[in-house]
Amino acid sequence: MTSAAGGHRILVVGAGYVGLTTAACFAHLGHDVICADIDRAKVASLSAGVVQIREDDLERLVSEGIAQRRLRFVISAAAVAATCDFVFLCVPTPLRADGETELSYLMSALDSVATNLRPGAVVVTKSTVPVGTAPKIGAALGRTDVALASNPEFLREGSAVADFLAPDRIVIGAEDHAVARRVAALYKSVDAPLILCDPTSAETVKYAANAFLAAKVSFVNALAAVCEAVDADVDSVLEGVGTDHRIGSAYLQPGPGWGGSCLPKDTRALVGVASDAGYVFDLLEGVIAVNEQQLDRVVAKVARAAHGGTSSERVESASEELDLDGIAVALLGLTFKAGTDDLRGSPAIRVAERLRDGGAHLVAYDPALGGNLDERPDLEAQLPDGLLLSNSALEAVRGTHVAVVLTEWPEFGALDWARAAGEMATARIVDARNMLDPDKLRAAGFFYEGLGRR
C-alpha cells in the first residue's frame, strides 16, 4: 500500500528514542507512518506534538508530520498492522543481570502484529539484537508469506535526526536481496552508502561498530594514564595521532569512561556472542576492564584533590583507603554525554556512586536536568541516593571542596571560574573531560587536575 504522494505505509512499533526518531524521519521523507506504543500517556502526549526526549529537531519533525497527516500515534499495533507495507520493530532490548540480551519486548511486539500482517509485508528489525536473532524472529513469526529484514540503527543521542537523514551508511540484511532492496527504497532520498548483506552480518555490524568505538575511547583513556606516567601531554599526543587519516580524531578525547544505553550493552553482548561461538574475545574484555579502571582513576583524582594533592602526584587507581568523609563534591554533568538528558549507563553516575560510597557529600548540576525532577520520576530514580540537585553550576560548587567536570556541556567551559573559586570552600577541580583551560583555572586560584595533561 502506498500513500497518495507515492510513499509507503509504515508501522513503527515502539515510540522510544529509536522508534520515535525512525517514525518522524520516515514521515519527513514522505511516507505515511503510524507509530504504536503501549504507553497510553506517551501516545497522548505525542499525538499532541509534545516530545519529552531531548533531541535536536525531533519535536519539529513530529509536529510537522502530524500537521501534514503523515504521522500519527496509536496504542494498538495489531489494529493497524494489516494496512502497512512495512513494520519496523523499535523496542528496547536491554541487557539482563545474567549478561544475556532481553528479547521478550521484541517478541511481544512481533506477536502483537504477527497474525494481522498482510501477505507480502516486510517485518524489519531495527532494535539491536544478538547476532543470530533473525532466524528466531522468523520462527516466532511463523509465516512464509511475510518477509524479514534487519536494518540496524546507528543513531547518536543528541544528533539522532541528523544521523537518520544524513547517515554514514545504511545497512540492510535479508536472505532475499529483493527484500533488502524494498527496504532500501524507503531511504531513496537519503544520500548514503548502501550495504546489502545477510541478516547475521547486519546484526554483527551494529555490535562491531559500537565495540570499536568503545575500544577507541578505552585506548585514549589508557594513553592518558601513560602520558601521566611519562610526563607527556595527552593533548599534544592526540593531536599528533588524530591527524593520521588512518586513525582520525573522532572519539580521541579522554573522559571518565564510555557509557550510555548502547556501548556498555553492545560490547558485553559481543563478548557473549563470541564466547557462545567458542571464541574468547580477550581484546574486548580488556576494553571493558580499562573502562572500569578509568572510573576508579577519576574517583582517585577527586580524593587526592580533596586532600590537597599536587599536579606532580600521579594517580594509578582508586585507593582502598579512599577517605572522603566530610568532603563536599560538586558534580558538573550527570548525563552520559552533552546534548541529551539520558542517564542510562552514564559514567558520571557511576563516578558519583563511588564517591558516595567513599563518604562524600554530593551536589550536582546538569543543564538537561535543572534542579527539579518532580515531573521526571524516571530520571530521578536513576540518581544516587543522597545526591542534591542544583539549579546552576555556581550554586552547585558553592561551599564544596572539589568540583569535577563529568559531562562536556559547553556551559561549563563558559563559566566564570574566578567567581566559582570564591564560592568554593577550597578551589580544587578535576576536569574529567579535559574541556577547561588549565592555565586559566590555575590563574583563577584553582588546583587543577585533568586527564593526562601536564
Image (cartoon, rainbow, N blue to C red):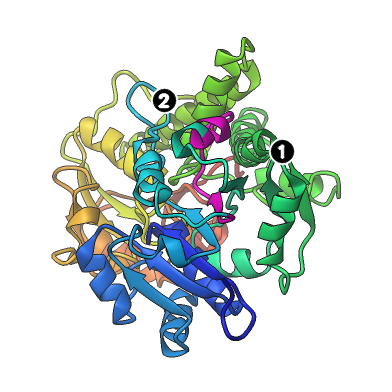
Q: Which residue is mark 1?
A: 198
Q: Nearer the viewer, mark 1 or mark 2?
A: 1
Q: Position of residue 393 (x, y in %)?
A: 31, 66
Q: Amino acid at mark 2?
A: Glu
Q: Is 125 part of what is drawn in magenta? A: yes
- Residue nearest the observer in this picture, 352 or 378: 378
Q: Position of residue 227 (x, y in %)?
A: 65, 34
Q: Position of residue 40 (x, y in %)?
A: 21, 64
- Residue nearest the observer in this picture, 242 or 192: 192
Q: Which residue is mark 2?
A: 100
- Separation of residues labelled 1 and 2 (CA atoms): 23 Å
Position of the C terminus, as image quadrant, is top right
| Segment tinted magenta in the rendering | 120-138
Q: Position of residue 91 (x, y in %)?
A: 40, 49
Going 21% across and 43% down the picture, which residue do you hit? 384
In the rendered image, which quarter is residue 20 located in? Answer: bottom left
